Amino acid sequence: MSLNIIVLAKQVPDTRNVGKDAMKEDGTINRAALPAIFNPEDLNALEQALKLKEMYPGSKVTVLTMGPARAAEIIREGMYRGADGGIVLSDRAFAGADTLATSYALSAAVRKIGDYDLIIGGRQAIDGDTAQVGPQIAEKLGLPQVTYAEDIIDVKDGKATIKRRIESGVETVKAPLPLVVTVNGSAAPCRPRNARNIQKYKYATVPSEAATDEKKKALAEKRPYLNIGEWTAAYVDADLQQCGLAGSPTKVKQIENVVFSAKDARRVENNDAEIETLIKELIANHTIG
Amino acid sequence: MATDKHNLIVYCEFEDGKVADVSLELLTKGRQLADKLGIKLEAIVAGDNLKDVEKQVMPYGVDTLYKVEDKRLSPYTSLPHSSILINLFKEKEPRIAFMGATSIGRDLGPRVSSALHSGLTADCTQLEIGDHKDARTGQEYKDLLLQIRPAFGGNIVATIVNPECRPQMATVREGVMKKEIYNPDHKGEIVELKADDYTKPEDYVVEVIERNVEKSKVNLKGSPIVVAGGYGMGSKENFDMLYELADVLGAEVGASRAAVDAGWADHDRQIGQTGVTVRPKLYIACGISGQIQHIAGMQESSIIISINNDPDAPINTIADYVITGNVEDVVPKLIKYYKKNTK
């Protein structure tokens, strides 16, 4: 038995390492100041897919992302780690999408791919932390979903057995394919890049990248496996009314940097006498002790 | 006059005979907002053995309780619970719907919002009612739900609205809203619904085959003192020093997201918008710069001590005491003088 697996991935700004220049003066985000990375939980998802590919030889792993052409970077990253190929879903019509419009576009691309047993993504992306796109894609495709997955244990008789990590502990569920799974950060980390894969795929490109690079263009024509798909809204038959800003029920009313109502903080010097005074005070007013 | 349509509804999580705290917190917030809008507060509970559920939810001011009792609805699985909400919401057209930002609410909410094409805002830290004017069309909207949440890793706070689509849906994490009895004798209507009228047989395809309940050993919410470490702790070894301080003070150890991401503390110790919200008597922030997303989870602490070598760390603005210095110098001093003065 072999499986067709689609891994949903997102290229995100590294919000974990936000420096002082990350915010512009008007309170908007200076995306250019932040490195773009493979969303961490999507790497956990990729690992689950690659593990299944090893368990069931002949399986195929396709990485699907939505974003600008430079998001091809994470498709290559996925291929270096063992994915077979990927697709960047890229169109101006997708700009300004909230989670619902994003899941609509991605579900249209999944339909276009057509042949799939498992769709695996990270639980959430670090730039939004919503955890909504996975379940919304499942709903749009009419598929069951398993969220907060920690381990896809196996696939037998058309059913996947999956361990989930939830607040109260661990739960094991059995769900029929095709199925959407979202993977938690507590799952196994992704395997590193493989040197042979780097050699093989380092010139993999989307057509718009190849258009400006003669060498890549020539290689892509000679070796089909170097072609990363670059799909538009029209190519996946997406209804433009459901894409981007137009297809987003939620609107951002306001964005602000927060000004905390400053308390009158007492400065305590880092010396023995002042710290002992502080401790004595906290003991006297029953805060500690 | 309020009708059975266009009300505010809360999905209440129910397990082992108990409605989850987060659901009761949402009922409390829901009651306030419903009063403000002059609409009813409704609750829906789906599960098994729901006998006493009304006793648990009515004191929070529920006007209508929908009960869907069926063995197949417990334990929770995505499809039947989402079908119930989707079909009930189509029927009752609620104006606003809340659910907990838990592994259940965050599994259920997006699925329901997708089916109804209604907006959903995750992990809100404040919910208010207010007006909105669309900057592009100039159209004005009265009394929308303002869904306020930190975004972008906690570097900004965004106010989100759903001008056109209903219900306006939001999830909120446990501990963010306060739980308060509205009226111990409040009486509401109970409406029993049949699972078969709201779900299809094929909704029951996912099977829970095993459950191992692991109660978290970390009790951040209940601890009167919290010692929390951030990225400024510098290393796992330095972070581990906080356990010593917590041990002498009888405190629990918490962490900022950066410290959890660095692998110095487990995820269940994370304090902030995407972690636990705490309101202890004393909060000692060690090497925490104070991103909004962290502050959202601890700003209501009674006393805040910030230890940081950056005198301008944002967290210092909300602190009662600021100690500027290296954490690894200050913490041993705190331990030493606490021991000396409590003997």
Image (cartoon, grey):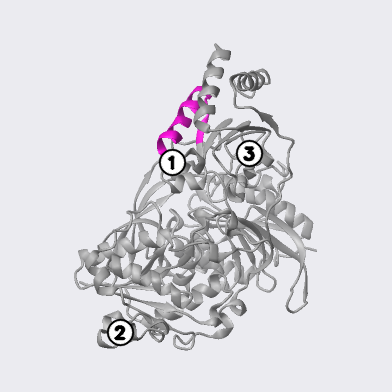
Q: Amino acid at mark 1?
A: Ala
Measured in 3D between alpha carbons, the distance from the residue under mark 2 to the one under mark 3, in whole angstroms, is: 55 Å
Q: Are marks 1 and 3 in contact (CB under 8 Å)?
A: no
Q: Which mark is in front, 1 or 3?
A: 3
**Mark with earlier residue (1, 3):** 1
Q: Residues within 10 Å of mark 2 (few under 14, many from 20)?
A: many
**Would you name the residue on which mark 1 appears?**
B265
Q: Chain of mark 3?
A: B
Percent from the top left, x then y, of residue A99?
54, 69
Question: Given the image, on which type of amino acid does mark 2 rest?
Answer: Ala
Instruction: Using residue B262 as the reference point, say whether residue A50 is left or right of it.
Output: left
User: At which x and y percent is residue A25?
Assistant: 68, 61
Front in this rendered view, residue B169 or B234: B234
Residue at 64 percent across and 18 percent down: it is: A280
Residue B337 or residue A240, whichever sits in front: B337
Give the residue drawn at x 30%, y 73%: A202
Q: Residue at x 74, y 35 (%)?
A: A264
Q: Which residue is mark 3?
A: B311
Residue occupying the far front of the picture: A214
- Per the image, the residue denoted by label 2 is A220
Residue B84 seen in this snapshot: no
**Which of these two is toward me, B79 or B235?**
B235
Stretch of the chain drawn in magenta: B236-253
Subunit bearing disc 1:
B
